[in-house]
Each structure stands twice: as C-alpha cells, then as structure tokens.
Image (spheres, rainbow, N blue to C red):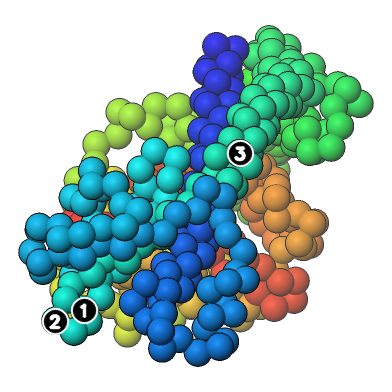
Amino acid sequence: MHNYNRKLIYLIAILVIYVSCFVGFIFYSVTNFAFTDFYKRLDLRRNIAAEKFLNSESASQADQWSLDFIENLNNQHEFLVEFDGKDSILRSQGFHHELWDKISKKGTSNFKSGKQFYSTKYFSQNGRHYIVGASAENYFYTHHLAYLRNLLIISLILGILFIFVVSVFMKRSFLKPILTMMKEVQAIGSENLYKRLDEEKYKGELHGLAQTFNRMLTRLETSFETQKNFISNASHELNTPLTSIIGQADLALSKERSNEEYQRTLSKIIESAEHLEKKTKALLLLARTGFVNNATAFNPVRIDQIVMDAELTVKAINDKFKIITDFSLLPDDSMRLKVNGNEILLQLALSNIISNACKYSSDRTAYIALGALDNKVFILIKDKGIGIPSRELDHIYDPYFRASNTSGIDGYGIGLPLARNIIKLHGGSLKVNSIVGEGTTVEVELPTYLRF
C-alpha cells in the first residue's frame, strides 16, 4: 500500500512539474513575442525619426506623410545624440545621458530601462556621428502580460488541484481493485488451492486478469494434486504388470502342465517383469529429477557425443529403429558444443525423445540435426509419424498422459515429462511442434559451457 502511495506521489509530482513547465513556456513565449514585436515597431519609428532629424529637408512627400500621420506609441519619445565617434557626447536632443552606456556606438541597440523600451541606431553623415533612437512604453507588457501572468497562475493552481483529484479518483477506481485482488491472491495457499477470485467483482482488463489468475490456480491445483497423488498413481501403474505376473504364476501352478506350457508361462512372466522394471526405473528417475535435482553433479560434456550415445542406446532397445543424423550445422570450434550437465541424465532425456520419434513413425525413422548458435546448442529431433492433436499439446508434459491417437502403440506417458524435467534442470528449454498425420518436431536448447 505504501509503495502504491509513493508511486502516486511521484506521478503527481511529475504531472505538476510538466504543467508548471508548460505554463512557464507559454508565458515565456508570449513575453518573447511581445518584446520582439514591440522592438520591431520601435525600429520603424526610430527610422522615421532618423529621417526627421537627419534628412528633413530632402524627405519626399510620402516620407513626410509617414512622419506626420503614423500612430504614436504609449509615452513615445524620439531623441538624437551627436558624438565624436568614441564616447564623448557633443550635443543631444531629448536624450537622457544615463542611458549612454547601454547604447551601441557602431550598430543597433534594443534594451529596456524601467517601463521604457528603447531602439537606437548609429548613423554617419558628412563626417559626423549620430545616434538616433525612439522609446515608448509597452502597454501590452505592462498591462496585458500582467493579466496573462495572473491568469496562468490561477490556471496552474486549478490544474494542480485537477491532477490531485484525478489521482485520488484513479487510486480509488483503479488501484483499490488491484489491491483487493492482491489480498485475495495472497490469501490462497497450498491448503486452499480450490479457492478462486470473484471474476464478477472486476471490470474491464481486471476481469481478464482475474480469469487468468483463476486459470493459473486451476493448473496449480491440478499439478499439486498430481504430486500429492504420485505414489497412488505409481501404484496404479505398477499394479497391472504385478497382477499379470501373479495371475500367470497361479494359473501355471493350478495343475500339472507340460514343459512347453511352463516355458510359455515363464516367458510371459519375464516379459511382465521387464515392463515392471522399466516402469519402476522411469518413475524413480522422474521423481528424482523433480525433487532432488540440486544434488546432481554437473560437469562439462560434449553434446555431440551424448547424441551419438543416445542413438546407440535407442538402437539397442529396438534394432528396427532407424536414425538419420545431420552434422552439417556443427561449428568449427568443438568447444562450442560443450554444456555443463550430467551425461547420464542428458543421454536419458535424448534417448526418450529419439525413441518416441522412431516409435510413432510408420517407417520407424527419426531425423536429428545438431548445431550451435550464439551461446547455446540446439538439437532438432523430427519424425514423420502420426503427430499430436493440437488440442492435446498442452497436456503432453503431464505424467502418464498419452495422446488419443496412440492406441495400439506401447508407452507409459512418462518419457517426455522426464525429458523436459532433465532439460529444465540443465537450464535449457524443450519445445514441441506437431501436426496430425505429418509428424512431430522436438527442439531442445541448452546453454553452452563457455560463453562467447
């Protein structure tokens, strides 16, 4: 709450400074225009005065008309100073000597003294040196600008009050619902993940934010329940092969059988036991990488060597699997292929992905590309298999989840979640893109051991 109040104060201060600068800029611009325009008018009268003082005998009829009929400014005065070309005044007409130091002796001068504005110019005629000037009071500056200044000050005060009122309104109408939402979210913990935000209470963007929070809470609740029920789920998965083993053994012992029948029964028991062993190892590895990954020792390893070892592992599992690897993208410097990780876990992750690519392809072929880019290495594993329905892609990392189009293909739904946990453990990312009937592409990125 105090943090929001502080930010609100900062916002008010910024707006006040902006409005003050804006008002100051307006006043400065108008004042500058008033000065510039008035000096132009004084320059005109100064030049007319020069005609009157210096060329009165030769002035044309049009010039004389201008001298006689041009409008005089408020408190307008004209003056003439003859000097020796340096600093000494020889004679003057209508001039106050205290202004002599402010006048340019060789050019044009525009300056203000008290309420009077002055415009002077140097003239040379018949070897003599003159300063001709005109002065007047700027009525707009002395009267209208004062009114404008007072008007701007009032506007500034009203603007500050408006900003303050709007800020308070924003706090009540916008920040208060956010604070209310924060309190509701903070009240939800692991013991009450079933609670949800009241979406009807919030309007506009906050309504969408409340919906997002509720969807996130739903995912958290599902994940939390999955973790809580991990043992029961594992028991359920292990129960099927155990039941098969016990049933087959009981059936074999129910009466005397031939050696061939015993051998078939023992073969089925061994097959079920092997399935049980695979499930147990997968479940233990999944639990280990999910909960005690900080204890895993990491060392610099070559990712290309791990890919080749994973290929050998997959082919050893099923000699019908085919793997085509593209090494054309490998960098010249082999050091860029080093990552900091655990060789066994990385090989397990890649073996699962490659095995899935072969298993779900009609031609049992997986395509692998390996390369390095910037500060990371990437591995692309692609197949031309059955693909994954788009509506099910959000669930592929759920333990034991299998796509709806995988019936008839052996699998437990553990390999991909296990692989992602291992990749995340190594600071990398795993992305899956799939089109039903065309195939699946898995992109794995891992940070390099040496940063360039």
Q: Are marks 2 and 1 in contact (CB under 8 Å)?
A: yes
Mark closer to the chain start, 3 or 1: 1
Label 3 or label 1, whichever lies nearer to me, is: 1
Dot 3 falls on a residue whose secondary structure is helix
Q: Is residue 265 visible?
A: no
Please report the residue visible at 53 percent of the width from the left and 80 percent of the height from the top.
64
Q: Amino acid at mark 1?
A: Ser
Left or right: 190, with 352 as reference point: right
Q: Amino acid at mark 3?
A: His
Residue 143, numbered label = 3
Position of 331 relative to 74 (above/below): below
Q: Amino acid at mark 2?
A: Gly
Q: Callout 1 environment at 10 Å: few (<14), some (14 to 19), or many (20+)?
A: few
Distance in Å between CA atoms under marks 2 and 3 = 43 Å
Q: Callout 3 environment at 10 Å: few (<14), some (14 to 19), or many (20+)?
A: few
Q: Quadrant of the N terminus?
A: top right
Mark closer to the chain start, 2 or 3: 2
Please report the residue visible at 52 percent of the width from the left and 26 percent of the height from the top.
13
Label 2 or label 3, whichever lies nearer to me, is: 2
Residue 70, numbered label = none
Q: Position of residue 339 (x, y in %)?
A: 25, 55
Query: Label 1, on which residue?
Result: 124
Position of 263 relative to 79 (above/below): above
Q: Quadrant of residue 358?
A: bottom right
Please report the residue visible at 41 percent of the width from the left and 84 percent of the height from the top.
57
Query: Label 2, on which residue?
Result: 127
Dot 1 falls on a residue whose secondary structure is strand
Position of 58 relative to 405 (above/below): below
Residue extending farthest right: 200
